[in-house]
Image (cartoon, grey):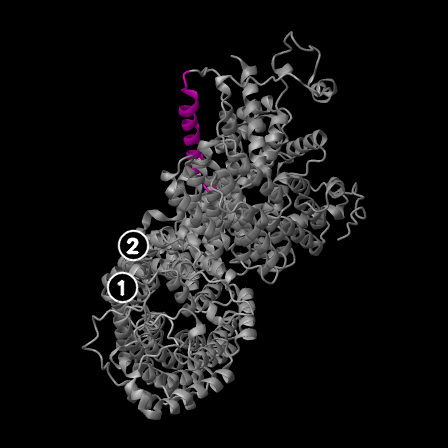
Amino acid sequence: MNQSLELDHLKFQLREATELLGSLGLYQGSKWCAEALNGIISNDLSKNLSSDKKSDSDETLSIYDLEDNEYDNNETTPVNDPLYNVIFKFPKVQSKINDKYQFAKSLFDCKEFDRCSQTLNGLKSSKCIFLRLYSKFLSHEKKKEEETEGVLGQNDNYNSTNPSIPLILKELDQLFDENNNHKFENYSENPFLLYLKGILLLRQKFNSLAQQTLIKSLKIYPFNWSCWVELISSLNNLDQSLQILKDFESFFEIKFLNKSNFNNNQIHPIQIIVKIVKIVINQEFFQQSMELYDDLNYLLQIFPNFSYLKTQKALISYHSMDYQEAEDLFDDILTNDPLRLDDMDIYSNILYVMEKKSKLSYLAQFASSIDRFRSETCCIVANYYSLKFEHEKAIMYYRRALTLNRNCLSAWTLMGHEFVELKNSHAAIESYRRAVDTNIKDFKAWYGLGQAYEVLDMHLYSLYYYQRACTLKPLDKRIWQALGNCYEKLNKFKDSIKSYKKVLNLNEVENFDNSSIFFKLALLYEKLLNSDKVYEFMKLCYNEEINLNVKNDETAKARLWLSKFEIKNKNFELAYNYASDFNHGTSQEIEEARSIAREARNRINSKLPNL
Amino acid sequence: MTNESPSHHNSTLTISPLIANRTRDIGGTPSYNQPLFPSPLAATPFRDTSESNSIRNLSTTKDNGSTSNLSAAEKLRLWRHDALMQHHYRTAEYIGDKVLSLTDDPNDAFWLAQVHYSNGNYYRARKLLSFKNLDATSVSCRYLTVLCLMKLEKWDEALDVVGETNPFKNESQNIRNTDGGIKLEASLCFLRGQIYSNQNNLERAKECYKEAVLVDVKCFEAFDELIRNDLLTPFEEWELLSLLDFSDVEENSELIKLLYTSRINKYLNTEKYEEAQIILKEDYNLKQNTDVVLGKADLFFIQCKFQNCLELCEEILKNDELNFQVLPIYLACLHELGGKNKLFLTAHKLAQHYPKKSITWLAVGIYYFAIDRISDARKFFSKASILDPNCGQAWIGFAHTFAAEGEHEQAIAAYSTASRFFPGTHLPNLFLGMQYLQMGNLTLASEYLLSSYSICSVDPLLLNEMGVIYYHKNELTSAENYFTQALLASKNLGSDSKAWISVHANLGHVYRKTGFYSKALASFEKVLKFSNNDSNIYSAIGLIYLKAGDVTKSIENLHYALAINSNDPVAADLLKRALDENCSIDIQSHTNNDFFARSKDIFSANNATYAYRQQQANKNSLKTPLTNKHRNINQINNRNTLNSSIDQVAADLINGEDSSDDGDDVMELSD
């Protein structure tokens, strides 16, 4: 197996992608590709210190020891290798057109979007069309932003939509329709026009159609990371996402690996990308498995310096509540790339949960010193203030974060939490709504909505939101508990029982005190007049007291119930056992227990002579 | 005619056809026997002309080489004529009067009257012409008399003079007019039409205009009057075009025919129109000509392609800033596209230069209408319609102001007036139908819509309204039929306007009512693609999903609806029902559709992770004691159950667990 060639190929493709995405103004995608490219293990290492190069180079050296080799005259990329074919390329245009494109692109870079799109008016090559429509879209996004008068401001309505989207979509549809009679290119097969259509459809809430379009785009050009990001954000259902992944895997296998000149032992760069996507999707759906960790470790071998992958790993740890590991991973990221602010807001969340106040404070200061006006920085600072109970200040910073980047995913939810703190449920609900609007996978926001409506005693509503949260994170027992509670309030006892049983199911894993759940279940069965089950769960609740040595109100009540039950069934000895060392509960209950115990003892004593 | 422009030494005669013809004749090209211009040099006795229909016949066939060998009177006539051309009316009057006294020639009387007319002295012209019964004996004098009477607003008298019907009807149909000018008969017919139009007898007026243009195709005034005021239905217009005899214009016949073709309505025979456009552009090189471009703009306007139309209009206006033909379309486009600022500028320019034109105040009205100042808009629309009672746009705008305020009765009155002025356009009737529909009067509404339909059967907006009527009458199949027709029409016109959207929405509602849920959803989806801020659409989708038993999607869409309009009672009610359904399992026999069954796939997809965690937990339980576990779990809950987490934090702070923290004052971040 020639691992080195495969790496070169991967580098080649990433290099191409960086350039291509950059030339189209897809900065985030370009940045990601470049970061990946620079995160790849150096050849020297991967060749296991083969003879022709410095044998004593280690990883860090190979990064910093560039000075001597910075000027490189030999073209090392084997351009003529058939394996190194470019996956997608825009057709060549006349130099006159290209000059215009360059002019437009520089206007785009200077954020003169209107002028940019005007410059490209009437040009027919797909590259020009893309930039023209894309800048038109961005221009209206910007204007929309300016008109809203700030986050949750006066005009910040839900329905302030970008008026250019329908027009652009229509133009794209027309282009796709008439592609048959165009000589040089087939617009409907152009991955970037498809990408543009996909993101616009997403804005218009055409989720499934958007997904199809984005998938089509990715099948043509899988290195468009911006497109992957959009696709992943549009997924809201785990089994469907896994299906899409499988589809991609088999598609690329057929497309790239069955080519005769390709050695089947090798892994095509596209497969690497798909692997990364797979990890991201599993991470976003809170999944864990051996296979996932294997994949992740494999990728980290290839990309030892790719911070993005490390963030994913940290996030997986965070989701599986392994905060210590998550913190360590983020520390590692920070030391290797100290000025990287991306995802640092997640780090601050972890620190918040771990209540590492001083470290969070340090992180906030540090981030502010890098760039005070990044949405991540604002989130970190807001988290800090939240931990200090300065909720107004926290809200102010979240607002700022959202002003800087309206799609800042966690800020809406966290702002909702802050509003809850301030007992402003109305504003909280609005924030949560925006949160699920920007990120449909945000189970915390759904859960928050459920809680907010529960406070308002609108259980029908909160039930729905809990359900949404639950489909996103079915392994979270808190949600099941909330669901069970909700069903109970709505007098749906059977459903409530189902939900609580799910909680028990999940709790089994952790050997956790279930007494309150058992007690709840017992009460529910009582309402359903199923006395066998009531007994069973009262007993289970009581058993928790014995097994785990916990004493609380529920176990006490269970004891009391059991003792009464046994009295009724004339099992006085058992009743006495339950009631005798009853010492946790209200005075009334204790009194009651004592009287039961007395009665039971009397009965036992009175019975004895008979025996 | 390739004359140099006159310097101040020359008279306008140097560019008059009179001179041009003469020079050509000298050059030995005797093809023109008669000068184009009615010449003051005419010496032919006046009564000859009574047999002819044209004043051109007044002119002589005599060839005069130069002015030098003219008689004294003829020189005076030439003077008078040039004075008239240069608008020296007092000179012309002075000299004309002298010539008339000298010669006592009826022709000189005519020309003096012409001078009076040009000078605005209509009454004197009239008196002069009635002198010696000239208006009875000469057709040209009669023509001028009628013009004067019309200017004097003596409509009945004018009609008396011109006659209620065309007196030459039987004799002259096929006589060719060889001088290349407009037959006086046609002009008289045109005047008759104008008189009838002023007397509100539009039916007769229409007939007269038609006659005028049939008598002589060169009578563009009549043709324009017919087209501009929509006096003919689309079909009649094409019929008229086919009847016109273009042979009168000789070698120009094809050109004129094409020009006329591109002028008339574009509802029918679009191919013919396109063909005409192509020939005009390619063979005649009239690509830049205003009227050719205007035709194209008209077509775009009818197709609701306002952006393209606007671009063409702006192209025309670049050369001719206030072209009155273009302005109405231009203003309508601006209103349609929300170009308030440009409306403002145009209205101001017009008000500055043409304060007495109705179009000016129409523009001002449209501007105020666009910025939602309805009462001001109404004021200016009414001013425009007072200045020109035939200005249908002003009437419709006037009616719109009432409609916008929900004043149905007054809107109906105004639309009715408009419909009287525009018998050839379906719009007023359509608007009337819409008003009645809004008032819930289905019978009257359908009556008006049908009469509108008889004029134009391809307007998607109209077909849409028809569909709505049937929808309200609960005749869903007919409604569906009309909506599909409307779609077809809008497809033919290639539009994507609001009309297109509402047709799809309505069609969706019909499908929803008839139970074709998937079709309904498809329709609504198309609507949402182009406009997604209508809560009704989302409500309807929610209802469909609710009926189809997909509660989750139903709730989702109802949420969108309420997000757009939180006060939508329908959506709120539906949402409540959907949520009810969501919690009760078997309300409508969707037994297997409760939350647990629905989410089965999602739950099972998580099994791998569940298994993995269980495995890990088991491993851990073997390795580590569970003592600290509970505390951890409580912490884990932090981010979601904020209350408890804060309690925890508070407790920890009190207990001094976090005493290591000294960063309280570090965080002085300025805003």
Q: Nearer the viewer, mark 2 or mark 1?
A: 1
Residue under label 1: B246
Residue at (60%, 53%) from the top-left corner?
A416
Q: Secondary structure at mark 1?
A: helix
Magenta span dominant secondary structure: helix
Q: Is residue A308 magenta?
A: no
Q: Is residue A558 above or below residue A185?
A: below
Q: Residue at x 55, y 59 (%)?
A: A157
Q: Which residues are magenta?
A: A235-260
Q: Whole-percent x and y of residue B245?
A: 24, 65
Q: CA distance from mark 2 to mark 1?
A: 21 Å
> Which is more toward the observer, A110 or A454?
A110
Which amino acid type corresponds to the residue marked 1 in the rendered image? Phe
What amino acid is found at the position of numbered circle 2 in the picture?
Glu
Q: Is residue B444 visible?
A: no
Q: Earlier in the sequence, mark 2 or mark 1?
A: 1
Return the residue nearer the eye: B389 or A104: B389
- Looking at the picture, how far across and down is residue A394, in whole percent? 69, 52
Above or below for B365 versus B633: below
Q: Is residue A257 magenta?
A: yes
| CB atoms of marks 2 and 1 within 8 Å | no
Q: Quadrant of residue B218?
A: bottom left
Instruction: Check disc 1: other Cα within 10 Å, few if <14, some if 14-19, many if 20+.
Output: many
- Chain that bears disc 1: B
Secondary structure, mark 2, is: helix
Where residue B263 sits in the image (x, y, percent)?
A: 35, 63
Q: Mark 2 — residue?
A: B271
Q: Chain of mark 2?
A: B
